[in-house]
Amino acid sequence: MAPALPFALPPLVPVSSPWGPPANEASPSGLAFEGAPYAPFSKGDKLGKLADWTQDPGRDGRDQRSGRQNYGRSHRDPYQAYGASTASSFQFQNVEDESSFSLVDSSRTTAKPRATFGQGGRGGLVLRSRGGTQGRGGARGFGPGAGAQRSGYQRYTGARGGHQDGARTGGQRGGRGGRRFGWKDYDKPQRLRDSSVTISPDWQMLEEIDFNRLAKLALDIKDGTDVDTYGFTYYYDKSFDRPGGISERKLQVIDTLSYNPTTSDDPVIQQLAQKDEGRVFATDSILSMLMCAPRSVYPWDIVVNREGDKLFLDKREGGPLDFVTVNENAAEPPMEVADGSKDSINTPSALALEATFINQNFAAQAVVESDDKHEFAHPNPFYNPEEETEPLGSRGYRYRKINLSAAAEETELNLIVRTEIDGTIKNASGEDSFITIKALNEFDTRAAGAGGALDWRSKFGSQRGAVVATEMKNNSCKLARWTVQSLLAGADQMKLGFVSRANPKDKARHVILGVVGYKPRDFANQMNYSVANGWGIARSIIDMCLALEEGKYVIVKDPNKPVIRLYEVPRDAFDEGPADEEKQEENE
């Protein structure tokens, strides 16, 4: 018989469930578990330690704003506390209602502003955008506002009426020089330019040439010889060439006439064609566009007339070749209103009209009008003193013959090109030498499309090289064309004027900051322009056009791709009818 126990066993309450303490059944005193916190667990949990006194009590198994915010993502705790996933059940909770409690404090506290994106602040990230959203503004729609047509000629005057833009266009404001580090380049809206001429469905495309193919061509050509000369030129005002620069001089509006008719409307070229002086006829503006085609970005077009065994390269009246582009080669060129611009005076079309206006008036102001002038062999062939009231401006026309045939070719391919001279200057030996006068213009260094240009007023005197280098980058095509035109004309120097707005918001008033002179061939070397490549391009396109049958064709530069295309068009294409003439008279 087992000995009796020295203590009495407590009575056991029968339960329906044999596992865990009783839930609903009556429990003896001392074993009341009602209301006690209980952490559910799995039998597979590891019991590494019974309690973890080093764990952050505010973490509660979740990521909080602390130094260990993302600790659990890349690291694993070597110890797992029993019931750690529900540790909040054992945390102390204040059951008192503190909603009615408020702290009364009469002292004023100033919260320290936190640096935000794009703002200043110590320790804050500051990123400033240079330039607005890039857009593309087409060269189409320059309009005939800068000139008046008379007797088939394009007449330009220096009056303010010629400096009107009929388009409500603009360039978006922004910082200088475009956005840095490619910030949000993926979010740039794609801007598509319009073609300079509407491609009709009945036009047949004959050729398509990529600019990469044109860049590989080369042809060495000798300088041309004069066939005939017309007009007169005044002598250049040397006060613009002061070594220290000139003080700001107001750009004057001078009412003079200058003519720039197309090839087929030139009576001198028609006479030379009848005398079989050459097979190909063009003007320096048209030929320079072909020779500098790989540098062009804006759309343009050249009309090709094939008559007999001769070839005439023409331009459309009021087309892109009649106007001077601005910042065409900039990383973010000016854009039109349709692309989101808000400044109507800084669009490609408005800037082209302004630049053309500046070039005409600056060329007239940079010469000294007097009886002492250089007279060419014949008077101006386009000026009729009985019909015109404005005085004739300083302009000389040299019709030159250039042999485009290579040394191995037996037959000669002669090109007749009409070149222009803007002024005359005395050289060291006292003889007259010819110059061309052009002008670069500054509109707003902080506007979209400025191309990171320096402030000319503060930098032109001290950093003239940097200013010129920036213009070579932003206006590569325009400067290359001016250089080619100077070489074609046989000019000894090319004078570049730097003209800025008197007020960035006023496009009608300008000041002259200085003039820099260059020899055309040296300037071409500085721009890394190959004259041999330009002649190779011209010869290839001329050979392609000479192989065509008689008719009318047009060479169109694609507005959005580095490609030129040759189309066959009807004979009456681009011809102005009576309705077009009446509409033009109404616009004038």
Image: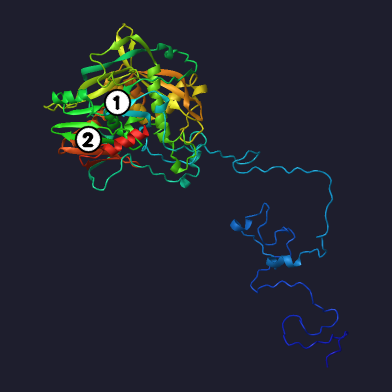
Left or right: 66 with respect to 347? right
Quarter where residue 120 is shown: top right
Q: Is residue 57 above or below residue 217?
A: below
Q: Are marks 1 and 2 in contact (CB under 8 Å)?
A: no
Q: Secondary structure at mark 2?
A: strand
State the CA–CA distance, disc 1 to disc 2: 18 Å
Between 167 and 556, the one nearer to me in the picture: 167
Between 582 and 287, the one nearer to me in the picture: 582
Residue 548, position as x, y percentages in the image: 16, 38
Quadrant for the C terminus in the image: top left
For label 2, the crowd category at 10 Å Cα-Cα, with few meaning under 14, some 14 to 19 and many 20 or more, is: many
Residue 21 badge: none
Residue type at the position of mark 2: Val
Q: Is residue 102 above or below residue 239?
A: below
Per the image, the residue denoted by label 1 is 260
Residue type at the position of mark 1: Asn
Quarter where residue 486 is shown: top left
Q: Secondary structure at mark 1?
A: loop
Per the image, the residue denoted by label 2 is 304
Mark 1 vs mark 2, foreground winner is: 1
Residue 223 can be seen, yes or no: no
For label 1, the crowd category at 10 Å Cα-Cα, with few meaning under 14, some 14 to 19 and many 20 or more, is: some
Residue 67 can be seen, yes or no: yes
Extreme-left residue of the structure: 410
